[in-house]
Image: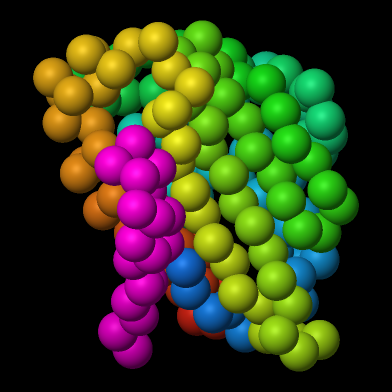
Amino acid sequence: MEYRAEIIETGDPRKKSASIIINAPAATIFNLLADPAMHSVIDGSRSVQSVISAPARLSLDARFSMNMKIGVRYRITNRVVEFEEGKVIAWRHLGRWVWRYELREVTPTQTVVIESFDGNPSPLQLWLRFRKAYPYVQIAIAKSLVRLKKYFEDGKS
């Protein structure tokens, strides 16, 4: 089955968002998002490789380090900056851009998931533009949401 995420026009060129409806309870989806070991499974950019160190479950101010690869291998440490159980989780790293997931229950077994990338807090705007990060991230977000949906609905990503 072919799944597609809906691109959300934010009106802000530094904020990219997409949404998808997933046939799974919000709490179940949130538990996966709060597990750093699962981030490589759903990452649409394929840049998240594996966990270096992390708690088993994320919470506000939790730090987690990941092995990454975008052309070259590197490591990044993130900090959870927003956390509302079952509804919102967001993290950022040294570059200060924020990755956010928002979950809205439609029914007890159906959830709207919105993923956003907010580059506004970053002092590295020239680098983000040079790397064409904003158009790239828009596509990666949509792919991540599709992988998340496939994980829950098809048992694969």
For the N terminus, which image quadrant?
bottom left
Across and down, in percent, residue 129 comes to 18, 24
16 magenta-colored: yes
52 above or below 7? above
The residue at 74%/77% (across/down) is 105
Q: Which secondary structure dominates the residues rendered in magenta? A: loop
Residue 133 figure quarter: top left
Across and down, in percent, residue 156 comes to 47, 69
The residue at 53%/32% (across/down) is 98
For the C terminus, which image quadrant?
bottom left
Residue nearest the observer in this picture, 120 or 77: 120
Residue 3 appears left or right of 152: left
127 above or below 27? above
153 above or below 114? below
Look at the image and tell me whether residue 36 can be seen: yes
The residue at 70%/44% (across/down) is 89
Residue nearest the observer in this picture, 115 or 53: 115
Q: Which residues are magenta?
A: 1-18
116 magenta-colored: no
Farthest front residue in view: 11
Residue nearest the observer in this picture, 57 or 19: 19
Across and down, in percent, residue 122 comes to 43, 17
Look at the image and tell me whether residue 52 can be seen: no
Across and down, in percent, residue 88 comes to 72, 51
Residue 126 appears left or right of 43: left
Residue 92 figure quarter: top right
The residue at 20%/44% (across/down) is 135
137 above or below 81? below
